[in-house]
Amino acid sequence: MTDLEALQRACELAAGGYPAPNPHVGCVILRGSEVVGEGFHAFAGGPHAEVVALAAAGERAQGATAYVTLEPCHHHGRTPPCSMALLNAGVARVVYAVPDPNPRAQGGAEALRAAGVSVDQISLPEAEAVNRVWLTAARRQSPYVMLKVATTQDGYLARPDGTSKWITGEAARLAAHVLRAQMGAVLVGVGTVLADDPRLDARVPGVGRPVTKIVLDPQSLLSGSEQVFQSPGEVMWLREEVRGGVAGVLAHLWAQGVTSLLVEGGAFTLGEFLRAGAWDELHQFVAPTEWGEGIPWHGGADPNLGEPDEIRTHGPDEERIYRRR
């Protein structure tokens, strides 16, 4: 297995798990021509990819080469530094694909070199792609924002009276739960909670950490007894107006450790994010039904989306994916 092949295998591994708000990372440990350990970061708070791979390798990590999709971290967060784990295991060489853009965690490559470990960096498009969401957020120091909405074919997310359950089918709803797990945090406005009383959890097998639920309630209209406050996971209940509008909300969430965010609405909240240009992706789940009247999903904003970049099917429903340039 060449350096490139080992890194490509690490990228395949990195796609596993739901590690938000942490990055997707994969690791392969090679001793001679034999793979002696593999791992990926499955969930925030769990062992990092390097630690999983080292545990699988055991004593065979001594003198081996570790291939990692992202520069090994060099800070104490929920877990100790991966740079020290590699060093203590006796790894002789480390090859990584993407330098860590996080100022708090970077420095692993330099620390390993200073300790006598051979370190190489090989750029790889697959390593950028598998970790696109986290890398985008870390480089601009603001959460990656994905808008999600379920609509009729003619663009309504609710009846004229505000009711909306259920527009799309079970397969589409499961896909939306996967998006929640992938992003790690989900945001709604108070109107959605009052109208639908959602749980906002991610009911997906293999999720090791509940999603963070964010509720915008600047007038304190909620009682705290709603389902969103009872279902598993941390709740950020924003009961005061955050200065700076959408940009201020994102800055506040970034300071709280939110790196990726799924905005589920309702129409007013989605419209505010659209008007602010504060989004990276839009996932519109479209049912093959028309109502003729109702509440438009975009809250009066001009989405100006053009053609979708990708279309996925979930039973009778379509998931139209738009990526902001």
Image (cartoon, grey):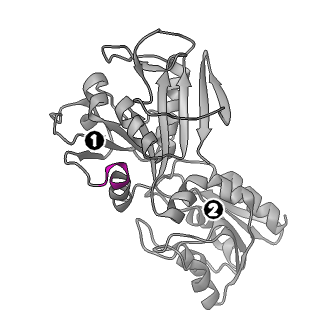
| Residue visible at 35% across and 32% down in the picture | 268
Q: Position of residue 312 (x, y in %)?
A: 65, 28
Q: Nearer the viewer, residue 297 or 319?
A: 297
Q: Amino acid at mark 1?
A: Leu
Q: Residue at x 53, y 79 (%)?
A: 84
Residue marked by disc 2:
56
Kindly identify the amino acid type of the residue bearing the numbered disc 2: Ala
Q: Is residue 200 above or below residue 54?
A: above
Circle 1: element type: strand
Q: Where on the picture, by quarter, is residue 300?
A: top left
Q: Residue at x 43, y 16 (%)?
A: 166
Task: Tell me the quarter of the image containing the N terminus.
Answer: bottom right
Residue range (magenta): 244-248
Viewer can see residue 284: yes
Where does label 1 land, which residue? 216
Dominant secondary structure of the magenta stretch? helix
Rendered residue at 16%/34% (across/down): 221
Residue 323: give x, y in percent of width and height: 60, 42
